[in-house]
Image (tube, grey):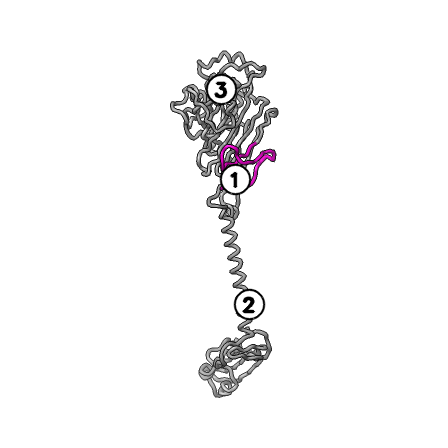
Amino acid sequence: MPRVWGGIALAAALLGGPADAAAQVFIDASSRPDFTIGPLFVAATAPADAGAPMGVSITWNLVRRHGERPTQRTLALFWPAEIAGATAAGPADPALVNHLESRGFSTTSSGRLALRARSQSQLGLPTPADDLPVSASYVSFVRRDAPPQAGTGSLVWIPPTPQMGDQRWVLNLTLPLRGLIGPKPATWLEELFWGRRNTLALSWGDVGSIAFYPLYHEHRDRIVHLAPEYSRLFVNFPDADHLRIEQIEPASATRRGSRLRAGTEIVSLPLNTVDAAPQVLKVNYAYYRGVFSWRPVLISIGLLILGNLAGLWMISGEVRRFVRSRLRVGREHAERERTLTPERLAEIKPGQSTYDDVARLCGLPDEEHRRVAATERRTLVYRETHRRPERRLSVGWLTAVRHWDIERYEVEIELDGERVEDVVFHVRRSRASAPD
């Protein structure tokens, strides 16, 4: 499942950075940085189009462990996702590209990102941050010989600035990241009823794909940890009027309307700055169009209409059967001409009538039986059913039926060759509430 992974800040000189990065300072710091990151705010904005790049804003500064202001230095930010495009002019630092290429990674894109600073007194206000005269270099890369599903990572070098380590300021870096929102697994019926639902996961402190682990393992003792200060993960949903959030994890996360931007929902999670384990904020959501989420309503109405039509069809069948069996509309009509009547059968003379005479009087038989031992002998079988309503009450053209008298006729005509030998006539009478 795609995730917006949290960054891991590394000392650039310890990553083999450029010579003008004051490498001796990092050597003095050895493999254990004497500063921490604090405060840290990671905010993602979920676009209405799940396929569009998602902006992730990182706001932070440095805090020295013993209270002194940290020495200005270049930092590296690793993020296991693809940066969609540059936000500042200029090519990436060639040393950064060489650093990754020499460690078994292939570059997919590179460029520069705008670096900004904001006074801490302006935090929480809609005023824009100040653009700094320097920018950060980035490279997006993949692991050589790794399968495509291993994903893409990015490494950002952040140059030193006067505001770095100054507690009156915080630094800000915005990353337009690609492929961070994925569809929530669902059956075709759930997709039909609710439409596509998305999953967004914002986290901090994880390397991401195992394909990037060698880069982390090489510098794992140089990770800059979080300071015990107020730090949070945020996910902003700008179109709150057309938003449906289904699930939020973990339970400690909170959801509320933005106090700065109208029509925006915010889901936030405070970061645990003591435990170094990865922390994840997961949101299952979907945007819809129109005044309300029309898809489940229309499908429910359609199912209701189909159910009512099916019920009406079943009831109409019962009504038709009742009308047909209990009511007669119109005047008496002549009953359909009967084939098997005593008068017509009396014209068939055993020993005289032939097969052609029988077929002329009664038509083709319903069944014909032949005896294997006597190939010249056969039996013709005719069947016919007569239905007669027993009327109870008549009002004009409408007549109520009390019951139906049913007579089932079966005639067996035995032939020897072409001559009729015998005629057997069966009549079965019964009474029923319906003619069928």
> For the residue labelled by badge 2, is the local secondary structure a helix, a strand or a loop?
helix
Q: Which residues are magenta?
A: 240-268
- Residue drawn at the location 58% of the way across and 34% of the way down: 254
* Dot 3 and dot 2 residues touching (CB under 8 Å): no
Give the residue type at disc 1.
Tyr
Q: Which mark is residue 318?
A: 2
* Alpha carbon separation for disc pair 1 and 3: 35 Å
- First in sequence: mark 1 or mark 2? 1
- First in sequence: mark 3 or mark 2? 3
Bin the neighbour count of mark 1 within 10 Å (Cα to Cα): few under 14, some 14-19, many 20 and up. many
Q: Nearer the viewer, residue 62 or 3?
A: 62
Q: Nearer the viewer, mark 1 or mark 2?
A: 1
162 inside magenta stretch: no
Q: Position of residue 108 (x, y in %)?
A: 42, 28
> For the residue labelled by badge 3, is the local secondary structure a helix, a strand or a loop?
strand
Give the residue type at disc 2.
Glu
Q: Nearer the viewer, mark 1 or mark 3?
A: 1
Q: Position of residue 116 (x, y in %)?
A: 45, 23
Q: Is residue 94 above or below residue 265?
A: above
> For the residue labelled by badge 1, is the local secondary structure a helix, a strand or a loop?
strand
Give the residue type at disc 3.
Leu
Q: Which residue is mark 1?
A: 285
Q: Position of residue 321 (x, y in %)?
A: 54, 70
* Alpha carbon separation for disc pair 3 and 2: 81 Å
Q: Which mark is residue 75?
A: 3
